[in-house]
């Protein structure tokens, strides 16, 4: 086991109140595993990633819980100690390749900086490694392109450069926050392909954060579905898509227009909207949008139950479990 | 399974009652935010006080009633250089005129010059900047090069040059100061327009059939106005300073009228013998400028939608 | 035989990036470079392509945000390209647009009711006394409540703002609405709501859509016919079912193949394209796709293929045909 997040909560202290962006979540990532966290805006998935990396800014802070990386609690480390890990053992790539690269530095300098900070190599060796990485991620004429500035490259290339930078020190864990959202479909396919190759080559684990269930289905081994800061469902990819349990997951899957869906019927819609984090409904946070909500749902928040390796947070399954069934 | 009442039940009730919410006043929100900034409130209070004084003095002079303790222009050589005492709170100057009355009298000049000069800069600057920003191309280049030429010369020198051409006097000073600041407003307006112009709602305004002029005035300028208001508030304080500077140099108001800068200039020689002749006009200028700056900073926060706490 | 509402002929939009000292163009960005197709009354024509293909620019030309460099646009038989500003403005009652970014498409200083009322008022479509009623009607049509009329855009969510934008477009009772990626910026669960709404409105008001998107899955749900663009040109047009069942142009095939499929059981053979989308500046001679094409032949580098009908209503631009 590489990373274990234990009952972590992250909150933001605003003038109008405290927003719990992440509420008591726990999960693990093993070596070489691709775990996807799926959710919409306000689900807390990006905040989770930032919390793990220690990149939260005021007024956000980790309120409770542990983030155990090989039995070291990241939440208790100082920024200096975290810096040693960042880029070296744990790396991150972000959504917007345009704003994640420093526009006044050449590509090669940005990657070399990362290498030389963490590895004890000469400048010449760092440059050689940089070009090797650029080549690995599929940048054509890597030796020449290394001298480019970010604005001279397209979005897809920049994303690949960022990936090269993140992988330069062969990290054990890569956190990818919506790595393909801003990219064209054909480039997205390339980047996902790249992540697979990297996983094969370096036996690297990936925490993939996305709202795109299609990407999850293609790329992930296991999935966590988040809603309003809580884990609603967790399963391996096959099980989640074949047998989604939580009404939110079911709704999401049904509302996505499918390429292989030939019928012209209306798309299924989840009614209502994501609630205001300062004004959450009592009980289960999904209760006001759920087709199956019962009276109990408006009073209490269900616990996360495990059924055959498939975790779900919903009262529908508490009773089902009691009855010894594994699906509704 | 029973379906629960949606948390939008309040919405449903309102809908049923055909109730339409009153429009939320933008001004009210701005005022609330501003109120929380204590410095800005102090600034506003001081400005209010100064405005009150200026108005009171002006009205009384127009109606022939004397509310000032002494006639600000009455000179009694036997009473020159009296230190501040019970009869003359700020003392008297070299010509025996009561300093307190002169300072109060000067308020109306300073404020009116500030407001008048900014009005000139603003009106011309907004039109030039809006045209340059919206039209773009050669028009933009032509206007901005002209503005650049004006900005290349230090504003005081430019003002003096204008005064040389126009002649001495308060009204000429107003025009000179007004002209000098046009480029700043033109630039700010142009910049704001450029940033707002590419927003989709401006495109939408065109698509639904608006003419260009209406697009600028109804869609672009209202979103740009906050920047202008802040700049104008700060502009009043610099106009006050510029007036004082011109007065100090003897180019603005002509004697015997009371104007703080002029008073400061004439008191130069008495810095050691009668320092109060310098201190009080100096303080008056400082307080006025400070008040407008505090208000301007407060407005910047109050009007900036990003900084605003919703 | 359906009636043609808008006939686009050889439309091109070139942006001059650099000129030499004599003012002659040196670098030209050919955003749209010779596009021809027709939109039939009552249909939803889906226009799909990746960034830089020119689909958004094309949409903007149709609503008069850009003037075309060359080409003609016939709307109900009338040539729009020869009209002056004022004459063209009168067509705003017939052709409207819905925008992609719900956060930038509404004037933050106007209440949503005023935003919707504006097109009615400036075009003098109704007497003053009836405007308000129509505004409320439009709000309700798009799923918003009457009492929200005086609220400002920042008080609404992305999906709701998009609804306001739709209501605004409907206000003039247009015949054609250009939808420029209207759901791309929305959350997945809201996308379905808005797509359903657009479908319902089309039925109810007999609208015609030009639906621009970069996602072939979204296009499939709402379109009747689909056109695929690449680097300023149309490379394939076909009725929906035909295009998805039988894509002929290699680019279309790659585009379809690249869409992640929800069902992990259906893991198919993916076509991964090499290289990046080339720039619309300095477009290559010959077929624009050949640098990335997996079925490239010799003549592809030399001649540009022309769009021709290969089977009933199915047009392709490719040397394979």
Image: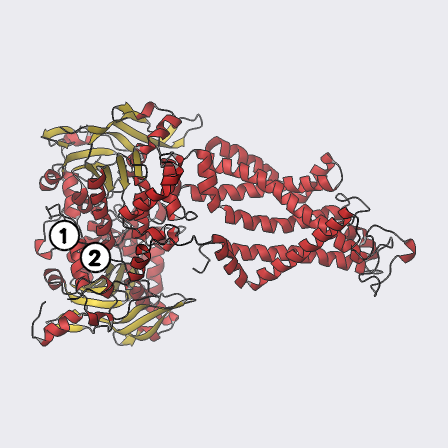
Q: Residue at x 14, y 69 (%)?
A: A316
State which mark lies toward you, 2 or 1.
Answer: 2
Q: Image height check: is C299 above or below B232?
A: above
* Left or right relative to A273: residue B305: right
Residue B32 in the image: state x and y as whole percent: 50, 60
Identify the secondary structure beneath mark 2: loop
Is residue C284 or residue A252 the one in the foreground?
A252
Question: If the image is split into quadrants, where does the C terminus of chain C sit?
Answer: top left
Residue C126 in the image: state x and y as whole percent: 36, 36
Instruction: Give me the C-alpha separation between circle 2 and circle 1.
Output: 21 Å
The residue where tag 2 is placed is: A270
Q: Are marks 2 and 1 on the same chain?
A: no
Q: Give the number of the disc on residue C261.
A: 1
Crowd rating for badge 2 (residues with CA inside 10 Å; few <14, some 14–19, many 20+): many
Q: Image height check: is A209 above or below C199?
A: below
Residue A93 in the image: state x and y as whole percent: 29, 58
Q: Residue at x 27, y 44 (%)?
A: C181
Residue A88 in the image: state x and y as whole percent: 30, 65
Crowd rating for badge 1 (residues with CA inside 10 Å; few <14, some 14–19, many 20+): many
Q: Give the number of the disc on residue A5.
A: none
* Left or right relative to A84: residue C302: left
The answer to whether residue C122 of the structure is visible from this angle is yes
Q: Image height check: is B277 above or below B244?
A: below
């Amino acid at each position: 086991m590489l990373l274990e997040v234990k009952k972590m909560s992250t909150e933001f202290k605003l003038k109008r109140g405290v927003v719990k962006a992440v509420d008591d979540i726990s999960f693990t990532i093993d070596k070489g595993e691709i775990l996807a966290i799926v959710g919409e805006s306000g689900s807390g998935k990006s905040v989770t990633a930032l919390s793990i990396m220690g990149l939260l800014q005021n007024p956000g802070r980790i309120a409770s819980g542990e983030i155990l990386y090989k039995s070291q609690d990241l939440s208790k480390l100082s920024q200096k100690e975290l810096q040693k890990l960042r880029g070296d053992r744990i790396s991150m790539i972000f959504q917007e390749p345009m704003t994640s690269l420093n526009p006044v530095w050449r590509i090669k300098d940005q990657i070399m900086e990362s290498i030389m900070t963490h590895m004890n190599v000469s400048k010449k060796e760092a440059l050689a490694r940089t070009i090797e990485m650029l080549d690995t991620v599929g940048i054509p004429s890597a030796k020449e392109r290394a001298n480019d500035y970010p604005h001279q490259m397209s979005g897809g290339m920049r994303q690949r450069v960022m990936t090269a930078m993140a992988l330069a020190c062969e990290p054990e864990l890569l956190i990818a926050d919506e790595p393909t959202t801003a990219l064209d479909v054909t480039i997205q396919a390339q980047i996902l392909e790249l992540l697979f190759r990297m996983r094969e080559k370096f036996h690297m684990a990936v925490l993939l954060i996305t709202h795109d269930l299609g990407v999850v289905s293609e790329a992930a081994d296991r999935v966590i579905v988040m809603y309003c800061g809580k884990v609603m469902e967790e399963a391996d990819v096959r099980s989640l898509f074949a047998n989604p349990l939580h009404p939110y997951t079911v709704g999401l899957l049904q509302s996505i227009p499918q390429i292989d869906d030939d019928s012209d019927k209306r798309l299924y819609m989840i009614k209502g909207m994501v609630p205001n984090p300062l004004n959450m409904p009592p009980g289960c946070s999904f209760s006001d949008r759920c087709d199956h909500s019962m009276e109990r749902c408006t009073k209490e928040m269900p616990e996360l139950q495990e059924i055959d390796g498939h975790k779900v947070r919903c009262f529908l399954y508490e009773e089902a479990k009691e009855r010894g069934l594994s699906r509704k | 399974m029973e379906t629960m009442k949606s948390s939008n039940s309040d919405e449903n009730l309102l809908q049923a009652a055909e109730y339409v919410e009153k429009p939320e006043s933008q001004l009210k929100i701005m005022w609330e935010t501003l109120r929380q900034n204590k410095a800005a409130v102090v600034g506003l209070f001081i400005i209010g006080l100064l405005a009150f004084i200026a108005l009171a003095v002006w009205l009384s002079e127009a109606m022939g009633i004397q509310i000032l303790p002494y006639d600000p222009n009455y000179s009694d050589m036997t009473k020159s250089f009296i230190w501040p005492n019970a009869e003359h709170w700020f003392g008297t100057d070299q010509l025996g005129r009561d300093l307190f009355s002169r300072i109060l009298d000067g308020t109306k000049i300073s404020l009116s010059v500030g407001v008048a000069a900014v009005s000139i800069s603003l009106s011309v600057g907004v039109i030039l900047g809006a045209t340059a920003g919206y039209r773009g191309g050669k028009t933009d280049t032509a206007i901005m090069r002209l503005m650049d030429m004006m900005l290349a010369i230090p504003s005081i020198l430019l003002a003096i040059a204008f005064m040389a051409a126009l002649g001495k006097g308060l009204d000429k000073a107003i025009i000179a100061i007004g002209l000098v600041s046009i480029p700043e407003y033109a630039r700010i307006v142009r910049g704001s327009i450029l940033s707002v112009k590419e927003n989709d709602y401006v495109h939408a305004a065109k698509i639904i059939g608006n003419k260009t002029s209406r697009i600028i005035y109804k869609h672009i300028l209202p979103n740009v106005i906050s920047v202008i208001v802040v700049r104008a508030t700060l502009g009043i304080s610099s106009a006050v300073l510029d007036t004082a500077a011109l007065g100090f140099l003897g180019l603005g108001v002509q004697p015997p009228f009371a104007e703080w800068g002029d008073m400061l200039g004439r008191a130069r020689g008495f810095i050691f013998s009668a320092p109060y002749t310098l201190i009080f006009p100096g303080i008056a200028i400082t307080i006025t400028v400070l008040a407008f700056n505090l208000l301007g900073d407060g407005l910047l926060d109050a009007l900036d939608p990003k900084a605003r706490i919703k | 035989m359906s009636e043609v509402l808008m006939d686009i002929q050889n439309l091109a939009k070139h942006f001059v990036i650099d000129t030499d000292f004599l003012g002659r163009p040196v670098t030209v960005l050919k955003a749209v470079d010779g596009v021809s197709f027709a939109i039939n009354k009552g249909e939803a024509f889906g226009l799909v392509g990746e960034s830089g293909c020119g689909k958004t620019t094309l949409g903007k030309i149709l609503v008069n945000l850009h003037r075309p460099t060359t080409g003609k646009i016939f709307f109900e038989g009338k040539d729009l390209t020869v009209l002056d500003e004022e004459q063209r403005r009168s067509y705003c009652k017939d052709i409207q647009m819905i925008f992609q970014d719900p956060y930038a498409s509404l004037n933050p200083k106007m209440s949503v009711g005023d935003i919707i009322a504006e097109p009615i008022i400036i075009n003098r479509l109704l007497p003053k006394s009836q405007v308000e009623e129509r505004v409320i009607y439009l709000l309700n049509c798009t799923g918003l409540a009457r009492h929200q009329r005086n609220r400002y855009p920042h008080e609404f969510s992305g999906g709701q703002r998009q609804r306001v934008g739709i209501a605004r477009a409907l206000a003039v009772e247009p015949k054609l609405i250009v939808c420029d990626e209207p759901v791309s910026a929305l959350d997945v669960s809201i996308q379905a709501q808005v797509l359903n709404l657009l479908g319902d409105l089309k039925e109810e008001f007999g609208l015609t859509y030009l639906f621009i998107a970069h996602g072939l899955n979204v296009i499939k749900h709402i379109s009747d016919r689909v056109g695929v663009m690449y680097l300023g040109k149309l490379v394939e047009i076909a009725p929906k079912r035909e295009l998805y069942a039988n894509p002929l142009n290699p680019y279309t095939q790659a585009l379809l193949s690249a869409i992640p499929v929800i069902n992990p059981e259906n893991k198919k053979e993916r076509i991964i394209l090499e290289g990046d989308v080339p720039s619309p500046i300095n477009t290559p001679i010959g077929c624009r796709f050949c640098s990335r094409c997996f079925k490239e032949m010799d003549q592809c580098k030399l001649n540009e293929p022309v769009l021709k009908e290969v089977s009933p209503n199915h047009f392709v631009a490719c040397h394979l045909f």
